[in-house]
Amino acid sequence: MNIISTQLPGVVILEPEIFGDSRGYFFESWNKEKYEQNEIHVTFIQDNESLSRFGVLRGLHYQAAPYTQAKLVRVIKGAVLDVAVDIRHGSPTFGKHVAVELNEQNKRQIFVPRGFAHGFAVLSEEAIFAYKCDNRYMPSHERGIAYNDPALGIDWRITPEQAILSDKDRRNPMLAEAEALSCEQ
């Protein structure tokens, strides 16, 4: 497994070793021991999967304490632009983001630690997106940030006219009005 650091401490890109031949391919999508050897210490409790069509933009989502979540995300089919935003109040990288294409060919994964908002935009005709979480979903603690906040400067690689949002995501506040998390998250 190749681990690529990003400009946001704790957010890393993971490139698994893929074994392929005429029958197809195989790779480990999660190995607790290997991740811990690479300083990723997390206990996942839930796996989620979604199917979305081109232009669907989910996010930017996070949960308030005590239900903050770390996530390990990947694409099974298709392609997405995956984004993590540092929302830890007092962090030197507060408001900064990392954006990486995840797709079925590169098999890349992103580890998004607690204290970051997360979202993705579907770039392919459709995408199957999978992720692990280290804390349970708690609707009362769910929060969001507007995907198009100019202060974030995210190029989602789709136009605003192409973006398909949930009603809830249309109402997300700008980062300046959103509930920030502490650096201890």
Image (cartoon, rainbow, N blue to C red):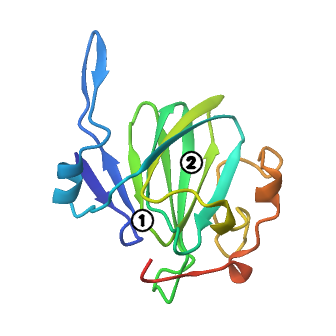
Which residue is depicted at the point 78% across and 45% down? 164
Q: Is residue 68 above or below residue 16?
A: below
Distance between mark 2 and mark 1 Cα atoms:
18 Å
Q: Nearer the viewer, mark 2 or mark 1?
A: 1
- Residue 2, given in percent of the width and then of the height, sits at 24, 49
Relative to the observer, which residue lies in front, 69 or 72?
69
Which residue is depicted at the point 22% across and 64% down? 39
Q: Is residue 35 above or below residue 104?
A: below
- Residue 18, given in percent of the width and then of the height, sits at 26, 31
Task: Please tell me how crowded label 2 is: few (under 14), some (14-19), or many (20+) other residues with Cα within 10 Å.
Answer: many
Report the amino acid beneath label 1: Pro
Q: Is residue 86 above or below residue 35?
A: below
- Residue 134, given in percent of the width and then of the height, sits at 42, 57
Which residue is depicted at the point 68% across and 66% down? 140
Checking the image for residue 180, the label placed there is none
The residue at which mark 1 appears reads as: 113
Q: Earlier in the sequence, mark 2 or mark 1?
A: 2
Q: Is residue 82 left or right of residue 109?
A: right
Q: Secondary structure at mark 1?
A: loop
Q: Is residue 104 left or right of residue 2?
A: right
Location of residue 105 (image quadrant): top left
Q: Secondary structure at mark 2?
A: strand
Q: Is residue 178 left or right of residue 86?
A: right
Report the amino acid beneath label 2: Leu
Residue 155 visible here: no
The residue at which mark 2 appears reads as: 81
* Quadrant location, the N terminus: top left
Which residue is depicted at the point 24% across and 44% down? 31
